Amino acid sequence: MKRNAFNRNGKKFCGGLFFFLLLFLLPFAIQALWNGILPEIMNVSTITYWQAMGLFVLSRILFGGFVGGKHCGSKKRHFGKAGFKEKFMNMTDEEKAAFKERWKDRCGNNNKC
């Protein structure tokens, strides 16, 4: 039992360490790419580490958010064959019929979805 708790805590620690390393190393990559490519192509000035960090944070806010793959208020969804099959098998007959009818309405009679 203690071993499982250690594994969970160890994974959390390694995940947190990886996150912080990534947080501080990605701006170096952004800075290197910016300073190596853009001044020659677009005639812009070079940037510092902190400007690269600012660009990284701004891009995460505008395009990705800081939550890893989860969206606010979203529930775990069943994607892939295994999850879909399990969800479908747990439906009642009425739910299965309603689901099939929705797909017929969505795809038409020729089922090209």
Image: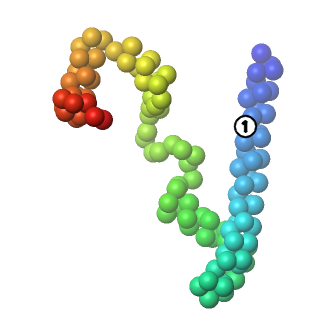
Q: Which residue is mark 1?
A: 12
Residue type, numbered disc 1: Lys
Relative vertical location of residue 49 with respect to residue 102 in this rendering, above or below: below
Query: Which quadrant of the view contains residue 49?
Result: bottom right
To which quarter of the image does residue 45 belong? bottom right
Residue farthest along the top direction in this orientation: 93
Residue 50 visible within the image: no
With 107 as the anchor, is 9 left or right in this view?
right
Picture coordinates of residue 28 (x, y %)?
A: 74, 67
Quadrant of the image containing the N terminus? top right
Left or right of 113 in this view: 53: right
Q: For the point 81% across and 20% down, which residue is it?
A: 3
**From the viewer's perspective, is 36 left or right of 44?**
right
Q: How is the image coloured?
A: rainbow
Element class at badge 1: helix
Residue 43, placed above or below residue 36:
below
Name which residue lies at 42% across and 24% down: 84
Give me the residue at 62% from left, 88% from top.
Answer: 43
Q: Nearer the viewer, residue 73 or 23?
A: 23
Looking at the rendering, in which quadrant would you find the C terminus? Answer: top left
Residue sitting nearer the eye, 42 or 78: 42
Residue 64, placed above or below residue 78: below
Q: Is residue 18 above or below residue 88?
A: below
Q: Position of residue 8 (x, y in %)?
A: 73, 29
The residue shown at (43%, 41%) is 73
The x and y percentages for residue 70 are: 51, 43
Query: Is residue 64 visible in this depiction of the protein?
Result: yes
Crowdedness near tag 1: few (<14), some (14–19) or many (≥20) residues, C-alpha within 10 Å? few
